[in-house]
Image (spheres, rainbow, N blue to C red):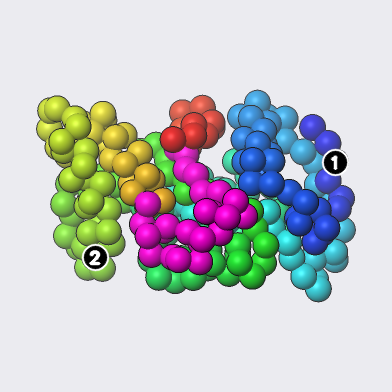
Amino acid sequence: MKHINNAIDQYTQTNLTAKCVLDDLIKGNTRFAENKVNTVETNALVKQTIEGQYPKAIVLSCIDSRVPVETIFDQTIGDIFVARVAGNFENTDIIGSMEYACKVAGSKLIFVLGHESCGAIKAACDGVELGNITSLVEKIKPAVNVSESEVCGPHDSSNTEFVNKTIENNVMLTIDRILTKSPILREMKENGEIEITGGIYKLSDGKVAIC
């Protein structure tokens, strides 16, 4: 645990590696799970980041209110970009945001974060049709389809194993599609400029498990 009163600057960001960033996020999550988070001088960080920002990562998360991204990774002002959509899947705007974060703003890591007991995943498992939610769950259906060939028993939200497998498959398929749909991010990864990974946040204990 330490006191944070300096925001990430360009020099610090430039010298970070993707591995260092991932390690930092995981260590931050460990602090969160153990209730040992850093203290932060927010007023100082607000003033230091007025003229610019140099976040080290971009996290794609679900909108779930139980998964406040900066909090669970013990990050603060200026540390990470966060994109959120129910079911934590990619779309054109989110991929564009990732390209901005990495290619323009210098972030070193893309992290796709799923979570336990995800309502959007359960809705996709159950084939829910309701307004614009119908279109949303269609984006998650590929993960449902993969899980159907991997898990026995009911293929709906009554089967916890099926839901959990779909949460994991959704993260991995999202990562694959990001790299397929973005030549910019794919090239950056191939050149070792960035990495992309995923994990699952457990509501039960506050810990993130890397997929």
Q: Which residues lie in the magenta part? A: 176-200
Q: Is residue 7 left or right of residue 86?
A: right
Q: Is residue 86 left or right of residue 55?
A: left
125 or 198, which is in the foreground? Answer: 198
Is residue 31 located in the magenta-colored stretch of the structure? no
- Numbered disc 1: secondary structure: strand
Quarter of the image with the C terminus in it: top left
Q: Which label sits on residue 135?
A: 2
Quarter of the image with the N terminus in it: top right
Q: Which label sits on residue 197?
A: none
In x, y percent, where is residue 65? 48, 49
Residue 59: tell me if it is visible.
no
Which comes before the other along the chain, label 1 or label 2?
1
In x, y percent, where is residue 33? 61, 29
151 or 99, which is in the foreground? Answer: 99
Instruction: Kindly identify the residue that appears in the image at 77 percent across and 38 percent down.
Output: 38
- Numbered disc 2: secondary structure: helix
Q: Quadrant of residue 47?
A: bottom right
In x, y percent, where is residue 8? 79, 55
Inspect the image, locate mark 1, and give the three-letter code of the amino acid beneath it. His
Q: Residues within 10 Å of mark 1 (few under 14, many from 20)?
A: few
Query: What residue did someone put label 1 on?
Result: 3
Q: Is residue 45 left or right of residue 116?
A: right
Instruction: Kindly identify the residue that appears in the image at 14 percent across and 27 percent down.
Output: 152
